[in-house]
């Protein structure tokens, strides 16, 4: 099997020739990791041992609209960038750190008035040129599986607030949160119509549910803000013959039934304790016949372990979830250091080799 065949077979919860293994690194297209010389050996190993994902991020722009008038960026010093927009109901601004992995110091929404300003921005459908996507997909046909990444409604809305303010709004201004989710769901469904009509895929990857997991919010919030919105989106893509993956960090064990209701092809990252609460063998029994499990080795464990410990981490995952197919092994995060420490790169190469060794059916 080539990578696409192997990956899609697993997403069907069927058994491929071996368990797909990924680091979510792509050595075949230009990106920050291919430009970093410290990644050279790791990228060579990815070509030899990994199932590569060609990840194309849908260019949805700010607020999922193609045109935002009077958008400005300003360097305000101390490594900070101010972004501002003159929305129909007034100015919005955000302040971010101008560095790789930098955080947000000021979010778009800090008041009810800011939320209304966001909703006043008119929707202009995003209709990107897809030629580059299809050109790259064709070039990587036997080397990678193509995936389009999008936010779900809660990802868009949650990212507009500081977490504590988002929690407060979800209680005190719940109708407004629902109004925003309704609007962004319409925009996402419109974008998906465009993508499906043009046969983009085969895999669609969504971020977002972790914004609503405890301890920040309750199971009721998860149902109201995730299940009620993501189900329609996921089912629309599934019915078109494509494949869907939902990504969520955090403690998802008590929400596995909710993910079954939503119905994605795959669920990633299934974090183990202590940051998560997934016992892979138990999750396999609960969802493994209907949802492909993608995970679940903590990245820091891979980075710091001995080679023998890396081998054990891989073998334990395989023993817990490999049987019968429907499993893709991956870390709970992709490599992010620049430069990457030599030991971390060595461990990740060993992880790939061990996944090939223990992943064969």
Image: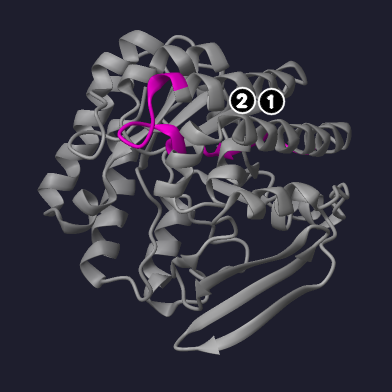
Total numbered circles: 2
* Mark 2 Cα-neighbour bin, 10 Å: few <14, some 14–19, many ≥20: many
Q: Mark 1 points at which residue?
A: 233
Is residue 242 positioned above or below 154 on the image? Answer: above
In what quadrant of the picture does the C terminus appear? Answer: top left
Tell me which residue sits at (69%, 19%) in the image: 232
Give x and y (percent) for residue 307: 15, 52
- Quadrant that contains the N terminus: top right
Residue 20 in the image, given as x and y percentages of width and height: 44, 34
Left or right, 187 with reference to 144: right
The circle drawn on residue 230 is 2
Tags 1 and 2 touching, CB below 8 Å: yes
Element at label 1: helix
The one of 52 and 196 positioned closer to us in this rendering: 196
| Residue 331, x across and y down, in percent | 34, 44
Q: Which of 56 and 46 is in front in this view?
A: 56
Looking at the image, what colour scheme do you see? Answer: one colour
Q: Is residue 326 above or below residue 350?
A: above
Res 189 visible: yes
Q: Nearer the viewer, residue 135 or 272?
A: 272
Secondary structure type for disc 2: helix
Mark 1 Cα shell of 10 Å, populated few (<14), some (14-19), many (≥20): many
Q: Which region is colored magenta?
A: 200-220
How far apart in space, not on screen, are marks 1 and 2 (Cα)?
A: 5 Å
Q: Which residue is drawn at 25% across and 14% down?
A: 282
Q: Which numbered marker is on residue 57?
A: none
* Residue at 44% across, 70% down: 102
* Residue shown at 35% from the left, 68% from the top: 337
Res. 16 in view: no
């Amino acid at each position: 099997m080539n990578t696409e065949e192997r990956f899609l077979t697993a997403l069907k919860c069927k058994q491929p020739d071996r368990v797909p293994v990924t680091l979510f690194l792509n050595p075949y297209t230009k990106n920050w990791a291919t430009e970093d010389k410290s990644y050279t050996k790791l990228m060579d190993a990815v070509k030899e041992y990994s199932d590569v994902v060609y990840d194309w991020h849908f260019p949805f722009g700010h607020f999922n609209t193609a045109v935002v008038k009077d958008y400005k960026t300003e360097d305000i010093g101390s490594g900070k960038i101010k972004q501002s927009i003159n929305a129909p109901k007034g100015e919005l601004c955000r302040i971010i750190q101008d560095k790789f992995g930098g955080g947000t110091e000021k979010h778009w929404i800090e008041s009810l008035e800011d939320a209304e300003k966001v909703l006043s921005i008119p929707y202009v459908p995003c209709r990107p040129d897809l030629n580059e996507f299809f050109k790259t997909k064709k070039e990587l046909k036997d080397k990678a599986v193509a995936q389009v990444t999008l936010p779900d409604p809660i990802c868009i809305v949650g990212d507009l607030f500081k977490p504590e303010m988002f929690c407060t709004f979800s209680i005190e201004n719940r109708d407004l949160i629902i109004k925003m989710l309704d609007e962004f769901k319409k925009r996402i469904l419109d974008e998906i119509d465009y993508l499906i009509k043009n046969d983009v895929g085969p895999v669609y990857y969504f971020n977002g549910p972790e914004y609503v997991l405890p301890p920040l919010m309750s199971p009721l919030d998860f149902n109201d803000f995730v299940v009620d919105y993501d189900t329609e989106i996921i089912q629309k893509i599934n019915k078109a013959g494509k494949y869907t993956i939902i990504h969520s960090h955090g403690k998802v064990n008590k929400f596995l039934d909710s993910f079954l209701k939503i119905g994605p092809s795959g669920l990633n990252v299934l974090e183990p304790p202590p940051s998560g609460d997934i016992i892979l063998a138990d999750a396999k029994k609960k969802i493994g016949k209907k949802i492909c499990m993608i995970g679940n080795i903590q990245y820091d464990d891979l980075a710091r372990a001995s080679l023998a410990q890396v081998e054990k981490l891989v073998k334990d995952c395989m023993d817990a979830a490999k049987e019968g197919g429907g499993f893709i092994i991956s870390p709970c995060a992709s490599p992010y250091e620049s430069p990457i420490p030599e030991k971390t790169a060595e461990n990740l190469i060993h992880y790939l080799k061990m996944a090939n060794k223990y992943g064969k059916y």
